[in-house]
Image (cartoon, helix red, strand yellow):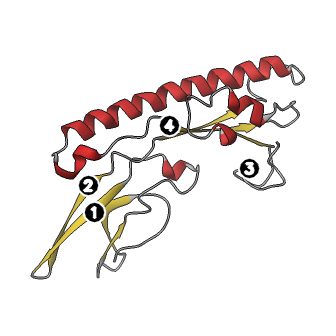
């Protein structure tokens, strides 16, 4: 069974609970959301079927834009709740570290792509800028303007308008709902 869905990529065949079939879950070939499940390297699967047996070979997709996601709790940061400059600086320091991680992944993927067999790969490129998402739990803290903040990184990340996602503790999970997002 090939389970087509949008997120987590898992091309290693998993035997069903009854042992009657195997499931391969390739996910989407591109990041469809800024979620943790999208941070792993994407793959496609080459499936070879012969005489009732099969072999599944993962093929990495080196040209998918890298995604770095982290969580930060301002409550645990030791910052003053109303010191917006210190909050801005702490968020910027975290985003800069995430950008460095994303840039390293871009370089790694470039090396892997160059080492791959040529042919059609000769025209492929790894996107220059990574996707970065910092999920910030900010219960009781001042927020920063996400648009202005993101513009400071516009030449270094692919998603400057979506780099920060604020949410409050007890807001129902990931903080992705409109009620918990601060702009």
Answer with mark 4 or mark 2, whichever residue precedes in sequence. Answer: 2
Do the residues under discs 2 and 3 have CB atoms within 8 angstroms? Answer: no
Residue 45's disc number:
1
The residue indicated by pointer 2 is 59
Answer with mark 3 or mark 1, whichever residue precedes in sequence. Answer: 1
Answer with mark 2 or mark 1, whichever residue precedes in sequence. Answer: 1
Which structural element holds mark 4? loop
The residue indicated by pointer 3 is 175
Q: Nearer the viewer, residue 115 or 15?
A: 115
Alpha-carbon distance for marks 1 and 4? Answer: 24 Å
Alpha-carbon distance for marks 3 and 1? Answer: 33 Å
Which structural element holds mark 1? strand
Left or right side of 150 for 97: left
Q: Nearer the viewer, mark 3 or mark 1?
A: 1
Q: x, y (%) of residue 95?
A: 61, 27
Quarter holding the N terminus? Answer: bottom left
Residue found 84% across the figure and 54% down from its top: 179
Answer with mark 1 or mark 4, whichever residue precedes in sequence. Answer: 1
Q: Nearer the viewer, residue 104 or 147?
A: 147
Left or right side of 67 for 48: left
Do the residues under discs 4 and 3 have CB atoms within 8 angstroms? Answer: no
Q: x, y (%) of residue 145?
A: 81, 33
Alpha-carbon distance for marks 4 and 3? Answer: 22 Å
* Residue 84: quarter of image: top right
Do the residues under discs 2 and 1 have CB atoms within 8 angstroms? Answer: yes
Label 4 neighbour load within 10 Å: few <14, some 14-19, many 20+: many
Q: x, y (%) of residue 174?
A: 69, 51
In the rendered image, the vertical position of residue 129 relative to residue 8, given as above or below: above
Label 3 neighbour load within 10 Å: few <14, some 14-19, many 20+: many
Quarter holding the C terminus? Answer: top right
The residue indicated by pointer 4 is 130
């Amino acid at each position: 069974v090939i389970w087509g869905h949008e997120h987590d990529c898992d091309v290693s065949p998993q035997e069903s609970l009854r042992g009657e079939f195997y499931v391969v879950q390739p996910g989407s070939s591109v990041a469809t959301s800024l979620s943790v499940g999208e941070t792993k390297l994407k793959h496609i699967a080459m499936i070879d079927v012969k005489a009732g047996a099969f072999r599944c070979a993962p093929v990495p997709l080196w040209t998918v834009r890298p995604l770095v996601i982290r969580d930060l709790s301002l409550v645990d940061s030791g910052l003053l709740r109303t010191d917006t400059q210190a909050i801005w600086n702490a968020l910027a320091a975290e985003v800069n570290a995430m950008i460095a991680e994303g840039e390293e992944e871009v370089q790694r993927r470039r090396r892997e792509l160059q080492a791959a067999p040529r042919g059609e790969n000769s025209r492929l490129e790894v996107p220059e800028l990574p996707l970065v998402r910092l999920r910030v739990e900010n219960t009781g803290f001042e927020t920063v303007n996400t648009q202005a903040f993101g513009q400071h990184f516009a030449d270094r990340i692919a998603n400057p308008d979506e780099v920060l996602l604020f949410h409050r503790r007890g807001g129902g999970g990931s903080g992705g709902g409109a009620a918990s997002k601060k702009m």
